Amino acid sequence: MIKSLLSLAASAAIAATLAVSLPAGAQQNYQPEYRLSTVLGTAFPWGKGGERWAELVKEKTQGRINIKMYPGTSLVAGDQTREFTAIRQGVIDLAVGSSINWSPQVKELNLFSLPFLMPDYRAIDALTHGEVGKDLFSIIEKNGVVPLAWGENGFREVSNSKREIRTPADMKGLKFRVVGSPLFNDTFTALGANPTQMSWADAQPALASGAVDGQENPISVFTGAKIHAVGQKYLTLWGYVADPLIFVVNRKVWESWSKADQDAVRAAAVQAGSEETALARKGLTTADNTVYKNVEALGVKVTHLSPAEVDAFRKLTRPTYDKWSKTIGAGLVKKAEAAIAARK
Ligand code: X2X
């Protein structure tokens, strides 16, 4: 009797110690670690954004939520077009992902890949920070994933190893690595080029070996991955599409957190997203164009197109725009066009 009372007291003491050693407010169903997926690591604004989100979450939840980042989409073996499904299924707990990589599952996200829809940064902001952004978040939510904030990969510029691109004719026959949304195949085919889809993990060796002649990515990716060093000597600034990044959480994980912690994770995502966007745009504006200068200093020929030159590309890709508008939804595309026309 005394013995069992003693052991009862002992286990109560152990329980009390355990409760004390848990951080304030932590619930038993919190995991010791949450897995955050990104494509790019900390050599790029994208990975820095993920790292910053994790850091801010830790701070704002007093360590209750501990996030580890897995760049290289390593949680899905580099297959970035499977990332969204993995978040939905809980293989991934959180992600900072590109609209392009998730568009095979969320077809409305193809909006940002419509060629020449967004002429400048204000146009991107008019979409992501307006009604269109809200609509897209509710679509993502309906797909079983909780969206919290926007970030940015950037305007995607075209590079290659063969020759300067000034007109669509210059692209004829060139082999380009394109990302995993079929819309990109259509766009490059319409321009007379030879597109081939592959993951970012496969793209780098393909560029290095010359299996492909060119690629398209934001300049921060071009410089971060140092692809000038594998012969990408020509870079044309045509700004034909831009991909925002979206900060999201798996729904079950989200629902396992207290309201206060949900608010903290959301506030951290908004802050990390806006810092990341600023970083992605740094040096790429008329006020500060140091990035272009730095790329030229690497021996890359940087070609700026005039509005008339851009029009030639726009004209040839218009049928692709129209075809994909139907897939995205004519109503959403109209709303986006109106928001861009009215941008401040
Ligand atoms: O694969 C790409 O080109 C990248 C890194 O930009 C994306 O993940 C969309």
Image (tube, rainbow, N blue to C red):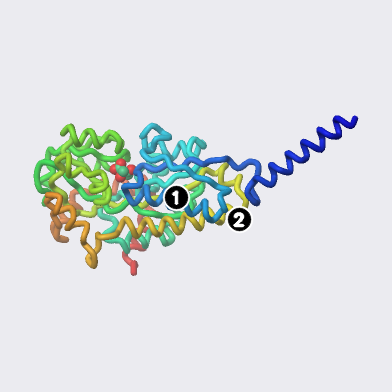
Under tag 1, what secondary structure? strand
Query: Quick one: label 1, few (<14), some, or many (20+) residues within 10 Å?
Result: many
Q: Can you see residue 79?
A: yes
Query: Quick one: label 2, few (<14), some, or many (20+) residues within 10 Å?
Result: few
Q: Nearer the viewer, residue 25 or 79?
A: 25
Distance, label 1 to label 2, CA atoms, is 18 Å
Q: Position of residue 218 (x, y in %)?
A: 26, 50
Q: Nearer the viewer, residue 286 or 59?
A: 59
Q: Residue at x 51, y 58 (%)?
A: 267
Q: Residue at x 48, y 54 (%)?
A: 56
Q: Position of residue 233 (x, y in %)?
A: 13, 45
Residue 260 tag number: 2
User: Is 89 positioned to the left or the right of 45 in the image?
Assistant: right
Q: Position of residue 148 (x, y in %)?
A: 48, 53
Under tag 2, what secondary structure? helix
Residue found at the far bottom of this picture: 344
Which picture quadrant has residue 188? Answer: top left
User: Is 68 positioned to the left or the right of 187 in the image?
Assistant: right
Residue found at the far right of this picture: 1
Quadrant, the C terminus:
bottom left
